Image: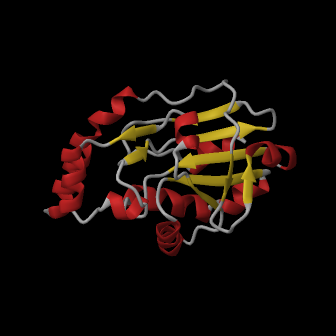
Amino acid sequence: MKKVLLIAFFILSSAALYAQAGLKKGGQAPVFTAKDNYGKIISLKTLLKTHKAVVLFFYRGQWCPYCNKHLQQLQDSLQMLTGKGAYVVGVTPETAENINKTIGKTHASFSIVQDKDYKIMKAYDVNYVLDDKTVGAYKKYGIDLDQNNGNTDHVLPVPATYVIDKSGKLVFVHFDKDYRNRPSIRAIADAI
């Protein structure tokens, strides 16, 4: 019963997302530089010089079962994606400690970037702010965004996925405001 109520709550609380539009297929991907969970500097420009494509995806946090399922699917198919010349990068607002929890749950071995100041999320137009009522309801279900993200501004990303080709063009876009919907690995791989 608690799971059903939680899912219903998430659906109703997604109203804040409707202002977001995300980037469109065919557009130029915003460049970024950030440090990943391994301490490696991740630069989109540099990655595109050495890889055929970059698979860039945004996830909400280790507390999100839909995010964990998608990360696990990416990990399970990582060799297929990297075999096609792609580099996979996840972006999240969660703290390094919680990124480690995500890795523990999903066994993710690809780069994950903490977007603490939301620069990447804002550049890709996937960021939104939860209202106080929703934040309170999340807490009732054991999801403390303040603790999870290390701040009190309650910003989350739409869980979008982009494939960026060598020229920096967005050749695949999956932007769905319903956080339950994620792209198939086949669709991502076909875009590379």
Quarter occupied by the C terminus: top right
Which residue is more in the foreground, 135 or 153?
153
Which residue is more in the foreground, 117 or 136?
117
Which residue is more in the foreground, 171 or 40?
40
Residue at 67%, 61% (x, y): give it.
Answer: 78
The quarter of the picture where residue 45 lies is top right
Of all residues, the one furthest to the bottom in this rendering is 104
113 left or right, relative to 48: left
Of all residues, the one furthest to the right in this rendering is 49
Rendered view: 123 above or below 110: above
The x, y position of residue 17, in whole percent, is: 35, 34
The x, y position of residue 158, in whole percent, is: 44, 41
Residue at 34%, 29% (x, y): give it.
Answer: 18
The x, y position of residue 175, in whole percent, is: 49, 35
Residue at 35%, 53% (x, y): give it.
Answer: 152
Quarter occupied by the N terminus: bottom left
Number of residue marks: 0
Rendered view: 127 above or below 148: above
132 left or right, relative to 62: left
